[in-house]
Image: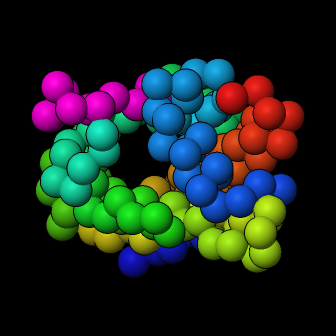
Amino acid sequence: MARIETNIIINADPKTVRSVFLDYQNFPKWNPFVTSFAKYTNKSDPSLNVGDELQVDLKLKGMNHTSTMYPVILVNTEKEFTWRGRLVSSWLFGGTHLFKFDSIDDDKTVFEQSEEFTGILVSVFWLFGVFGKTKESFIGLNESLKDYIESKKY
């Protein structure tokens, strides 16, 4: 098992940060890591509901290609958004990706992004530097979200 965890302080309240982050139609405006995000199931309802499957294209920092995954939403609450994805099967490779929105005070949020990876390919991906690029990509998403919100471009 491997885990990556990043966080950043954003000068906005958690409700705003969560709202901007979950406005997935606007990801192309600010998100360098998640280049495409769409609902794969239950498409008639634009809300992100527990059990919905997503189609997510990810572009790791420094890479030229994207990878597509189909995670399922596990949690969507005021303070947390979590999905679980897998490559063929969780025993081969899987990841539970958590996004948290914690208040520091009325106008500051700690945005946390973490993922726990499981499966027999974890050590192979670690060896080839995939987790280092993944952590850089998480940091890039965090910084871009902060810049986007604090510049009030949403």
Q: Is residue 84 above or below residue 68?
A: below
Query: As rendered, which of 99 and 61 lies closer to the eye?
Result: 99
Q: Position of residue 11 (x, y in %)?
A: 83, 56
Quadrant of the snapshot with the N terminus: bottom left
* Residue 127 visible to the viewer: no
What's the residue at 62%, 33% (across, down)? 31
Q: Position of residue 137 (x, y in %)?
A: 64, 46
Q: Is residue 99 above or below residue 65?
A: below
Q: Which residues are magenta?
A: 35-46
The total number of labels drawn is: 0
Rendered image quadrant of residue 81: bottom left
Depth check: give the residue in front, 45 or 145. 45
Report which quarter residue 112 is drawn in. Answer: bottom right
x then y, percent, for residue 80: 46, 66
Q: Check if residue 126 falls in the magenta segment.
A: no
Check residue 41 for magenta coloring. yes
Residue sitting at x 31%, y 44%: 48
Image colouring: rainbow
Q: Residue at x 80, y 33 (%)?
A: 152
Q: Between residues 92 and 20, which one lies in front from this camera angle?
A: 20
Quarter of the figure with residue 14? bottom right
Identify the residue shown where x is 17% and y is 25%. Answer: 44
**How far across and down, in percent of the image, does residue 97 sit?**
42, 61
Residue 118 located left or right of residue 28? left
Q: Is residue 28 left or right of residue 10?
A: left
Residue 16 in view: yes
Q: Quadrant of the C terminus?
A: top right
